[in-house]
Amino acid sequence: MDANANMHLTLNVWRQRNNSTEGGFVTYEVSDVSPDMSFLEMLDVLNERLVHEGKEPIAFDHDCREGICGSCSMYINGRPHGPLKGVATCQLHMRSFKSGDTIAIEPWRAVAFPVIKDLVTDRTAFDRIIASGGFVSVNTGNARDANSIPVRKENADDAFMAASCIGCGACVAACKNSSAMLFVSAKISQLALLPQGQTERKIRAEKMVAQMDSEGFGACSNTGACSAECPKEISLDTIARTNREYLGAKMTSSAV
Amino acid sequence: MATSPLLDAKIPAGPLEDKWNRYRSSVPLVNPANKRRLEIIVVGTGLAGASAAATLAELGYKVKAFCFQDSPRRAHSIAAQGGINAAKNYQNDGDSIYRLFYDTVKGGDYRSRESNVYRLAEVSGSIIDQCVAQGVPFAREYGGLLSNRSFGGVQVQRTFYAAGQTGQQLLLGAYSALERQVGMGTVKMYSRHEMLDVVVIDGKCRGIIARNMVTGELERHAGHAVLICSGGYGNVFYLSTNAMGSNVTAAWKAHKRGAFFGNPCFTQIHPTCIPVSGEHQSKLTLMSESLRNDGRIWVPKKQNDNRIPSAIPEDERDYYLERRYPAFGNLVPRDIASRAAKERCDAGYGVGPSKMAVYLDYTSAIERYGRGEANKNNLFNATPEQITVMGKAVVKEKYGNLFDMYKQITGEDPYEVPMRIYPAVHYTMGGIWVDYNLMTTVPGLYALGEANFSDHGANRLGASALMQGLADGYFVIPYTIGAYLANEIRSGDISTNHEAFDQTERDVRERIEKLLSIQGKTSPEHFHRRLGKIMWDKCGMARNAKGLQEAIQEIRALRKEFWSDLRVVGTANELNPELDRAGRVADFIELGELMCLDALNRNESCGGHFREEYQTEDGEALRDDENYMYVAAWQYLGESQWELHKEDLEYENIKIAQRSYK
């Protein structure tokens, strides 16, 4: 069925045993790549070969392979998730490349995302940012009837767009400062746009930004690389809104 | 028939509609001071696990949560697309708790437990309330209220949704509730940890052995109760819509330590998935059932018709679902839609390069929506082209992300040419047997969400998986766990120095060493693929006794080969995805055998279980209520040995009927 299974590629892949050893690029040649394969399936084929040769396969995070879980995380030729706009690595297909291409594959590069092995990084900093305030404090059972909280459709739609963040970390990887501003702003925006999020609006902005800083993410200088590389195309408007939220919160802060 | 004495479902007495309310008010409570001393282990952080962990921590229990992913937010619940059902009756179209209950039992082909399903329908409304309160951005109408859509097997609009990303939004809601508790220190989160066994002391579940997947270290965790929320086992088929990491290991270890496995052969084949494109394929991608709301499914009336779809005139198309099932049309339940597609393709009417696909066509929906828009905007002289443009805009708003995904994967634009779809493994109705409290046959060990067997019978209706996962986690287990834990307040801390922990850890270590020591020639991936082929060919959409008997022999041979020719590179003391995979494939192989055994035992067709020997003249599933109206709960006795126990299903509130969607 793979009638076009004739692509040949040269891969320069970052290999690193663990966090305490140095890594480096290793070159692999792969043949018989079908344009219908996804990028990760191409890596699967290479890994199967490496295992067959008794060599360790390339470790990379992946799970749903539908572009929604946010596990996959790699630079492809220097760009987070590769050449296409609005597409995560797992949804990138080999038809986006030409036979004969050389492709460089690297793990996220950011202080706050240390490498665990090969292309696998530790992104638990994102979980800690959410734990610091990325929620509405409502215990199970406290809720009133869902339709007693009407939400303007425009706000609901904008909140949804912000909420579609998959937490992959491409925004951080794309940013020259390794800022997590787009990730943080997506959550702050979602909840700031909804009536349910109003009560904790100020404290949320303060706490999430403080947590982001303490994790070692850099400052935002509004270059927009994050949004350009975001596989869910989260808008820069969310950052503008967060700046407004944060400024307003700080100026009237009751926190000491 | 009589229910096995080992299977006490603990269904409360009284009329169906009062059972849960009365039980909730009488189940023993644990006082707040004692809750702080009781530890609960939650394995898996999908909808069921995350909602349970968060809610139990809110109540004051000490909770430890485990997931194999790098973050709890990545559990595969995130990939659910279409929606979540709830009997809110917001659309005033006659919905009620009873109707949701009835639809679910009928959809499940009368093989689910009445009392559990009724409770599910009862709490469904509270789930929507809770999620909205968390800030889950469901789709809304211009008036600001929640929007609903229809799903298969149902004639009301009760499905709440967030574009094609409902699972993502619900999971992120549960995840945020979980992280809130993590931040407060009431839940301790262990990501990149895999549960490799449960520890049973004096007949009660007292903890787990987990492997830190980064360092390889084996860890002992004690708890007064353990909740298995690890999802389904569709990946036994190798190719499925499940995530690559989805596996049966946690559930299977529980099974081997005494938890009976219920209806393992009940698997759901989803009718609308993107067809397989080649040998390299690692997984299949679902196209949400919500697409059947507006899309029409057809094949050419002529066999082996190679014309492009637009060249096939209307009267030469066979809209076979509308033809065979006029009452429900394209919205028949999943099992029926899947079999109908297989029937057409097997008969030579399939389309696409592989001929194993049917069309899902949006042309008429685009025109219908376009006309609607034209009317709304008073454009009474709109040209067909203008109508098409407006119609596409509406379709884009409703299904945009699904259309984009299809285009990304296939390279074809579904706004211009019909999608090609084919059924694929999607969900498993079977799972660990649980009683009304969601407790397994091992005291203190629970199973929630897709990991248990309880609510969907032989076929799950669309948008009910999210409902069940969250019902179990938010609204059932927080109450029912009291029935057990109220008697545990005197147990004190459980020591991980107990000899049962020593022994279980030793078992786990030996198995890992064995996997690494075989040093054969074949990768875990390769074995997995072969297992998948056996399962799909002989225990898939259609099964027969001969095939199942062959499959059991083939699986046994495969297991033997696995344990003598497996090759796992790397070591046990590092991040080693090959080792993780090997352990999971070993468990899938054992499960595969049990699934075939169960399918062979069930001499009837019901829901997703279609035995070719048992069908009506027009090819519909033929149930045998007299002999098989029971839950098959399998007790593990040893390698390739199981004992069958039966829980009779009694329907006091529903009239059993031949399921008809015609």
Image (spheres, coloured by chain):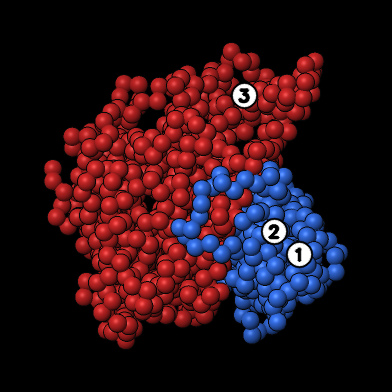
Query: Residue B615's quadrant in the figure?
Result: top left
- Find the distance from the CA under tag 2 to the CA under tag 1: 8 Å
Query: Which chain is the one coloured red?
Result: B
The chain assigned the colour blue in the figure is A
Query: Residue shown at 64%/65% (left/top)?
Result: A200
The residue lying toward the viewer, choosing from B477 and A46, is: B477
Name the residue beneath numbered marker 2: A192
Front residue of B82/B604: it is: B82
Residue type highlighted by circle 3: Asn
**Residue A119 seen from this side:** no
Query: Does residue B643 lie above or below B61 as drawn?
Result: above
Q: Residues within 10 Å of mark 3 (few under 14, many from 20)?
A: some
Q: Which residue is mark 1?
A: A245
Residue where numbered disc 3 is placed: B306
- Residue B657 screen position, x and y as percent: 28, 28
Instruction: Tell me the quarter of the picture where residue B23 sits.
Output: bottom left
Instruction: Say whether residue A216 is left or right of residue B85.
Output: right
Residue pictured at 75% horizontal, 22% vertical: B374
